[in-house]
Amino acid sequence: MGEGRIQGVAILGATGSIGRSTLDVISRHSDKYRVVALTAHSQIELLAEQCGQFHPDFAVVTEADGAEQLERLLRDIAPETTVLSGVEGMEQIASAPAVDQVMAAIVGAAGLRPTLAAVRAGKRILLANKESLVMTGHLFMEEVVANGAQLLPIDSEHNAIFQCLPQHGVLGKFPAGVEKILLTGSGGPFRKRAVETLGTVTPDEAVAHPNWSMGRKISVDSATMMNKGLEFIEACWLFGAAPEQIEVVIHPQSIIHSMVQYSDGSVLAQMGNPDMRTPIAHALSWPERIDSGVGNLDLFEVAKLDFEQPDFGRYPCLRLSIDAMVHGGSATTVLNGANEVAVAAFLNGEIDYMEIAEVIEQTMSEVAVEEVTDLDLVFSKDEEARAVATALIKGRG
Ligand code: NAD
Ligand code: MG
């Protein structure tokens, strides 16, 4: 990567929470980064506004109708932007020659194909879309190595761990001298709520995270701690850790974003205000540092840092995730697919909050675990998990 040269950036999922934060960081450094491409699913007007501000070469929308609408909206404000559509369009921009870095910030399995296209084109990938790594595991990491791509974690915990690990470590290999990764999580909005009352939780209560502002799917995942479960799996692949080398620690203040414990007794933590612009700026500029727009941490205001052990009775999704990782093979693909279906059904009012874990557990017991040998198997297991979970939900209704 040319030192000092302006970096071309593509943002997959530009209209989302991570996408918008990425544009905010980039807008502070127009001397270093140029937006080459933006993609969105349904928020066409917001995407048009972003194009009017950043003038990318390409804008991609999932559906052809949306692409037509975007073209009309851009006629006056960004006529130089070429509008594309569909997964093919996203794959095309993720691998475009003018792109150096790809922010992978589409939510869910929908992010897998475009993210893989960026990996295969040997780009620098800023990985927010944890689901694509959870679904594919070793296949994803092998593609990164085979194509000389660079992978930088955006998830705040993994970005923190990356910062606390020895420098020049190789992603995917657990470094010598490290004893354990301490993966922190806030415990979400229901950490103190009586477990018997969790069945009546509403979607609006579940997405109201105490510390972080995020998209709806990951907010529900944070309440159930499925998010921490997915992150547990993500950390195993990213850092080459065995399940017993990762410990989940509840830390309600979200000031420490994770820690690394060394064999000499040292524990390194990365701290900061809970604002995703910090890991985004870190990954964009690594190994340098740039301003992210995030204010300095005021330790006197924070005053106190608490730690608790997670209770699997309150967070069954966390146990299911760890079990899936221990089981290995396609178990994590099925976990992820079932979770996406169950969370969508919960947000839609079709099942109650506690049924999310039940649907996942039942789906996992019905879909056979197989070794993940290629991507076709990943896609077919994902599909099977979604079909089984959907049928289970219908059966309940
Ligand atoms: P979000 O819901 O706010 O945004 C999702 C983005 O994906 C939008 O731009 C949307 O247009 C796009 N999208 C949705 N469905 C799509 C589809 N079918 N095809 C193509 N594009 C589609 O989500 P978010 O909170 O920004 O999270 C994005 C990803 O980053 C998730 O994988 C999440 O787990 C991860 N992440 C988010 C945060 C956070 O603070 N928000 C933190 C860590 C990791
Ligand atoms: Mg996270």
Image: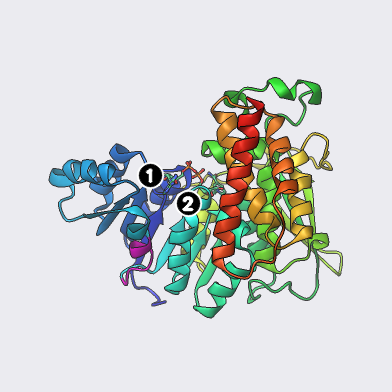
Q: Residue at x 28, y 53 (%)?
A: 59
Which amino acid is tagged 1? His
Q: Which residue is mark 2?
A: 110
State which quadrant residue 93 falls in: bottom left
Q: CA distance from mark 1 to mark 2?
A: 10 Å
Which amino acid is tagged 2? Ala
Callout 1 touching callout 2 (CB < 8 Å) = yes
Q: Residue at x 62, y 57 (%)?
A: 134
Q: How many marks?
A: 2
Question: Tag 2, which secondary structure?
Answer: helix
- Residue 309, image x, y percentages: 84, 43
Q: Is residue 143 left or right of residue 28?
A: right
Q: Earlier in the sequence, mark 1 or mark 2?
A: 1
Q: Which residues are magenta?
A: 91-97
Q: Which residue is mark 1?
A: 41
- Name the image quarter holding the C terminus: top right
Q: Is residue 180 left or right of residue 87?
A: right
Disc 2 within 8 angstroms of ligand 1 (CB): yes
Disc 1 within 8 angstroms of ligand 1 (CB): yes
